[in-house]
Image: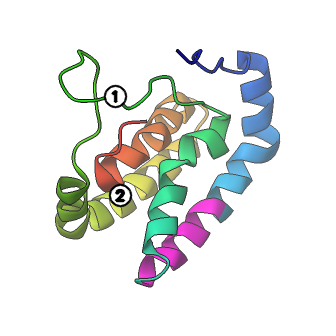
């Protein structure tokens, strides 16, 4: 049985966000959306969006995807996630990102904005991070 990856300390994650994560996430998301415009780049673009929590604050995935019925949460099927992305995910995630960015401009709203960026993979494609 593989051990769960340990999170970096709060201090390390905060310093990462302040000095790297804030601007790197903007570049990361821009590159992801350029890839999403092309059919060939779409899988990589979605994968990049799913990694936003790690780029933003070095947040590691805490749970593994497991077989259905084992008692733990598993990912929705790829077909359902693709259908959701085509109908809802692509535009809802753009609105979600815009709101998160606007909220992040205030110090008071920063925790909410980080939470929103961490939920972005779910908004775009129902991916549980």
Q: Is residue 34 magenta?
A: yes
Give the quarter of the image for residue 3. top right
**Left/right of residue 10 with respect to residue 67 in the rendered view:** right
Circle 1: is it few (<14), some (14-19), or many (20+) Cα within 10 Å? few
Q: Indicate which label's residue lies in the foreground, 1 or 2.
A: 1
Is 78 displayed left or right of 94 in the figure?
left
On-image quarter of the C terminus: top left
Q: Nearer the viewer, residue 123 or 78?
A: 78
39 vs 84, left or right, is right
Residue for point 54% across, 58% down: 48
Relative to 29, residue 53 above or below: above
Q: What residue is pinned by disc 2?
A: 93
Q: 27 or 58, which lies in front?
A: 58
Q: Which residue is at 32% across, 49% downward?
A: 123
Q: Percent from the top left, x then y, of residue 71? A: 23, 15
Which label was assigned to residue 74? none
Q: Please say if 119 is above or below 60.
A: below
SS label for mark 2: helix
Of the pair 24 and 125, the residue shown nearer to us: 125
Q: Nearer the viewer, residue 77 or 126?
A: 77
Give the residues in magenta.
Answer: 28-38
Q: Which mark is residue 66?
A: 1
């Amino acid at each position: 049985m593989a051990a769960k990856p340990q999170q970096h300390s709060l201090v390390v994650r905060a310093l990462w966000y302040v000095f790297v994560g804030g601007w790197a996430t903007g570049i990361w998301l821009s590159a992801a959306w350029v890839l999403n415009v092309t059919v060939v780049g779409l899988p990589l673009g979605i994968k990049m969006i799913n990694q936003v929590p790690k780029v933003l604050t070095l947040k590691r995935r805490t749970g593994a995807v497991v077989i259905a019925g084992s008692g733990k949460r598993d990912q929705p099927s790829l077909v359902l996630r693709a259908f959701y992305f085509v109908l809802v995910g692509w535009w809802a995630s753009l609105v979600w990102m815009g709101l998160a960015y606007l909220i992040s401009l205030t110090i008071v709203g920063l925790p909410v904005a980080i939470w929103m960026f961490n939920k972005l993979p779910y908004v775009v494609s129902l991916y549980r991070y």
